[in-house]
Image (spheres, helix red, strand yellow):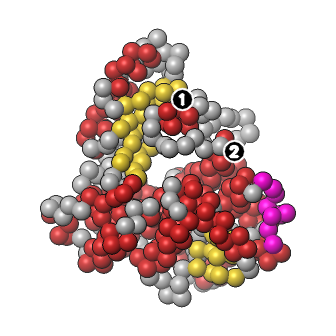
């Protein structure tokens, strides 16, 4: 049963990485306008409470207090930088938070991918839908739990136990959604059409949440493996299957696993073009700051950590595709490839690839993105 009490605050970005098995973390807040010092002190308080290594406050440089904020923040491992989207990557590199400033085109592709993710969240939070469907209410509750009580938890083992319980609570939530929409009859057909054709926004949101929970659980296991501290009473409460997951990651030194899964799932549409397999893994590894061999190993680890009858990957049509992935997210992965390979997907794809990831997939992604990006509004996401 879910804990009904959620954290009373929100964070814009909470990021982790594990170079060499050592945890590094960053907390980012973006503020508009002139807010005095209150936002800086709030960020410092959350950073201290959560045990985060460094912080970034994206602020308005026209604020008369901006220079003083920059000076005060330095002593607390916080960088105060211009919130202009065009300069954020450079500011992060200058602050030592990322090794290299990525090309603007790649950042634009990521903006589009995150907009599609935002569209799933918009569906989940749709008042009319969660009033109509009990499953959507459960999905919304799980997403809230995932973003609040789970993420904002300093003890990694307590975080892990909460994630594991969340993962086990409703393992077939997409099929449950299909059953409720169809009224019981035709659920399997609705499920199949949603999976292959991208129908039903509700189903796409459920597919997204199910994989999001798996990726977060892999992150929690990596964090527990990196910190290697089992003194918490929550470590003793963790299921044996999760502890085995932690041991596997530690033995493999797979500290890159969460980054690779994030890049593969959200940025590359959870698929690999087999006609350019080596290059695909090289590009994923570059964005996840690991080798192509480690990127490839991550997909094997995913299959090992989350056993699935029949295996997780379709390997046909010149593609390797993760199963149960939302079609709009698959389409967003095409945008990333258009940037990286400098061409339109219809020209880049083989005839076999175009059969299964063609114009319908592309248009589903565009349609989802438009729901969160009206043509008359500019936004970072």
Give 217 or 259, whichever is nearer the viewer.
259
Q: Residue at x 69, y 45 (%)?
A: 105
Residue 71 vertical placement versus 284 (above, below): above
What residue lies at 55% left-to-right and 43% top-to-bottom? 100
Residue in view at x 66 percent, y 65 percent: 279
Asked which quadrant contains residue 29, the reply is top left
The quadrant in which the N terminus is found is bottom left
The magenta stretch spans residue 134: no
> Residues at badges 1 and 2 in contact (C-beta under 8 Å)?
no
Q: Is residue 300 left or right of residue 87?
A: left
How far is disc 1 from disc 2 in space, using C-alphas? Answer: 19 Å
Label count reads 2
Q: Which residues are magenta?
A: 342-350
Residue 211 can be seen, yes or no: no
Residue 344 lies in magenta, yes or no?
Answer: yes
In this view, 86 is above or below 71: below
Give the side of residue 377 with respect to residue 73, left or right. right
Residue where numbered disc 2 is placed:
105
Q: Position of residue 37 (x, y in %)?
A: 36, 20
């Amino acid at each position: 049963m879910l804990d009904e009490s959620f954290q009373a605050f929100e964070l814009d970005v909470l990021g982790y990485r594990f170079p060499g098995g050592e945890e590094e973390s960053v907390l980012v807040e973006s503020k508009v306008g002139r807010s005095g010092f209150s936002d800086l002190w709030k960020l410092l308080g959350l950073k201290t409470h959560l045990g985060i290594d460094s912080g970034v406050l994206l602020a308005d440089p026209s604020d008369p207090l901006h220079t003083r904020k920059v000076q005060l923040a330095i002593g607390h491992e916080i960088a105060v930088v211009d919130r202009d989207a065009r300069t954020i990557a450079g500011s992060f590199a200058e602050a030592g938070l990322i090794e290299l400033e990525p090309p603007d085109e790649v950042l634009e592709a990521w903006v589009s991918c995150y907009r599609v993710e935002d569209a799933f969240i918009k569906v989940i939070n749709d008042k009319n839908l969660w009033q109509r469907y009990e499953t959507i209410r459960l999905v919304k509750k799980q997403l809230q739990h995932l973003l609040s009580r789970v993420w904002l938890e300093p003890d990694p083992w307590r975080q892990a136990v909460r994630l594991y319980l969340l993962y086990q609570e409703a393992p077939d939530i997409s099929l449950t959604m299909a059953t409720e929409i169809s009224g019981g009859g035709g659920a399997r057909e609705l499920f199949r059409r949603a999976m292959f054709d991208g129908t039903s926004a509700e189903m796409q949101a459920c597919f997204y949440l199910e994989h999001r929970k798996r990726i977060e659980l892999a992150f929690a296991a990596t964090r527990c493996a990196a910190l290697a501290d089992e003194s918490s009473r929550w470590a003793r409460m963790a299921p044996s299957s999760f502890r085995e997951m932690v041991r596997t990651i530690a033995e493999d030194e797979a500290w890159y696993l969460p980054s690779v899964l994030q890049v593969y799932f959200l940025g590359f549409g959870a698929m690999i073009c087999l006609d350019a397999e080596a290059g695909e893994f090289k590009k994923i590894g570059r964005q996840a700051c690991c080798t192509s061999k480690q990127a490839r190993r991550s997909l094997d680890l995913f299959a090992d950590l989350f056993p699935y009858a029949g295996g997780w990957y379709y390997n046909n049509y010149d593609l390797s595709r993760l199963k149960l992935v939302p079609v709009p997210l698959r389409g967003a992965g095409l945008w990333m490839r258009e940037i990286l390979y400098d061409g339109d997907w219809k020209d880049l794809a083989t005839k076999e690839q175009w059969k299964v990831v063609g114009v319908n997939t592309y248009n589903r992604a565009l349609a989802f993105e438009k729901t969160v990006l009206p043509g008359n509004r500019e936004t970072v996401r």
